[in-house]
Amino acid sequence: MNDKGTVNAVNNHEPLGLSDGQVIDMYRCMLQARKFDERNLLLQRAGKINFHVSGVGQEAAQVAAAFALDRQKDYFLPYYRDYGLVLAAGMTLRELMLSAFAKAEDPNSGGRQMPGHFGSKRLRIVTGSSPVTTQVPHAVGVALAAKMRKQELVTFVTFGEGSSNQGDFHEGCNFAGVHKLPVILMCENNQYAISVPIHKQLSGRVSDRALGYGFPGIRVDGNDVLEVYRVVKEARERAIRGEGPTLIEAMMYRLSPHSTSDNDLAYRTQDEVDENWKKDGVARFKQYLIDLGIWDEAKDVDLIAQLNLEIKEAIEYADNAPFPKPEDTLLHVYADREEEAN
Amino acid sequence: MAVMEYIDAIRLAMKEEMEKDENVFILGEDVGVKGGVFTTTKGLQAQFGEDRVMDTPLAESAIAGVAIGAAMVGMKPIAEMQYCDFMLPATNQIISEAAKIRYRSNNDWNCPIVVRAPIGGGVFGGLYHSQCAESIFFGTPGLKIVAPFTAYDAKGLLKAAIHDPDPVLYFENKKCYKMIKGDVPLDDYTVPIGEANMLREGSDITVIGYSMPLHFCLQAAEELEAEEGITARILDLRTLQPLDKNAIIESVRHTGKVLIVHEDNKTGGVGAEVSAIISEECLFELDAPIMRLCSPDVPAMPISPTMEKFYMLTKDKVKEAMRQLAIY
């Protein structure tokens, strides 16, 4: 016991330049993503929304990475499980819920895309699609534009280990390596590509592929918030120094089924899932904060109550918000004539 | 005004736009020191530097995808595909991404890329240096597709494509590069995307086409008029998407007989859609069935001279089809 009443507590965040307030903000953000995710599963089961694709088990790494970036300047190219990432980038629960309900006000797509297909120019979250890994060359292109314009920023792109097998991953990495572009590529290796386990997707490490592209590849425990923060921060510093891209493979586990249309126990066991819940990064980070004496169960209960309230308000707002007008289906195929004149 | 080759007009359009706007840049395979395998970008790297005339790794999906990323943040990339035959690795980036970026983001993002790709055969290119890829992309809302025939349009349409806030596929015909010459203004002008162009007036038949085969159509029309008194009206579509419906309908109404000509194969080609438009809009004004003259429905053009000649459209093939339609 030390003088704060904690056990064997070593402060690992201070040496990384993180204040107590910042690590608590990180925890809040990952819990926000977790609670949003869990609630959307229920909303789908209750018939309120049509679909949900989950990121439970991946929030710790997502939020840690976002906090290591410059959230006022950098560009985010997320994939569909990145609720933690986009919340950390500034998207609100209300905005995410508008997307889940496919309402007109949804800033991601105006109710056009499935949930989990993020985009917001205001937040520099680059619009994404469903064919996986197409966003990797886009991240390289945004970084190329930044380099050409001498802008000091990085692009941060994520994808799963399944989609790391796509040609666009390879083509994007190689291009970024050749031109030493400020790109950080983070593979969220959650062990499953829908139902196909990692040993049927990969015969080596994703991070080792970086060797062939001529830049560093780092494997990190994705449930270790501060380690993910550290490697992303170092990758950003390298990128800003003009030393080029970094590939990060964050190891984690997809604790939830792939989506609301998936029964994961058809291809994995409850025991396996339960074992991985014990390694959950969010719970582990909470324990770290408690051990340091800067967090406690009472505060946690308060936080959850507060998040539940925020989610409830977001649901009420999204549920009551108008759908897009049917005929708006025809809008925005091309620029309007007036826009073209500008 | 200067008389120049089609390929020089394409190069001039890029040069002028790059001088005007530092956001315009070219990326592709061999576009730099070599100036492209056809010399389309010759001299541009010397003028604008390696960053703005960028030799990329040999990977078409990255060429398109990187261009898309740069375009989304305000650059104006011109991505060169060395041959349209090698463009298919980039199809997912073009169809799933570029074409849908404005729509899927509800007008938040847009993607002003130009993808240039040479089409067409008759150069002993065999199956994979001769194709016409336009029907693969045709019918994808969100894309604009142009295919100039004249040197004037080659410059004006490329400049319009670069200015356009949406993705434009620019199909240049490699047989036209040196064969087609014409007057090209040396000042700044554009040819509007979406407008067809009447190449020749006539009252007996209408020929609708685009790109290189129009060269044969024009020759055949001159001969038919001189030899047999048959006059042909020839419409150059210039833009394949969106099609200029009014111009198509108007040109057909004028003669009541229409032949549609293109080098891309017949089934599912642009001509099928032109034919459908005519059927929907002015069927009862026709005096003969709609006729199409296109390449045969085989996978692609063989290299052997006898087979290439069989595959390709020629002046004589076009002339015979025009005559048959006129005497119907």
Image: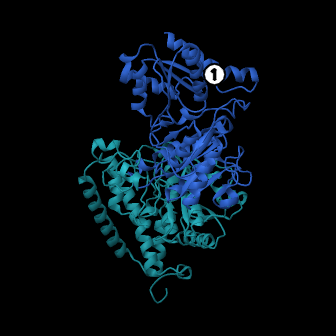
Q: Colour of chain B?
A: blue
Q: Residues within 10 Å of mark 1 (few under 14, many from 20)?
A: some
In this rendering, the count of numbered labels is 1
Q: Position of residue B67 (x, y in %)?
A: 57, 53
Colour treatment of the image: by chain
Q: Position of residue B224 (x, y in %)?
A: 57, 17
Q: Is residue A256 left or right of residue B220?
A: left
Image quarter in which the C terminus of chain A is found: bottom left
Q: Is residue B156 left or right of residue A318?
A: right
Q: Position of residue B149 (x, y in %)?
A: 57, 35
Depth order, front residue of B275/A248: B275
Image quadrant in which you'd find residue B312: top right
**Residue positioned 54% across, 12% down in the render:** B324
Q: Residue furthest left?
A: A320
Depth order, front residue of B54/A107: B54
Q: Is residue B38 above or below residue A141?
A: above
The answer to whether residue A166 is visible is no
Q: Position of residue A129 (x, y in %)?
A: 48, 49
Q: Is residue A216 left or right of residue B245?
A: right
**Residue positioned 46% across, 76% down in the render:** A23
Q: Colour of chain A?
A: cyan
Q: In the image, what residue type sits under mark 1? A: Lys
**Residue positioned 30% across, 51% down in the render:** A104
Q: Is residue A328 above or below residue B274?
A: below
**Residue for badge 1:** B315
Image quadrant in which you'd find residue A316: bottom left
Q: Is residue A290 above or below residue B152?
A: below
Q: Residue furthest bottom?
A: A3
The answer to whether residue A150 is visible is yes
The chain to which mark 1 is attached is B
Q: Residue furthest right?
A: B304
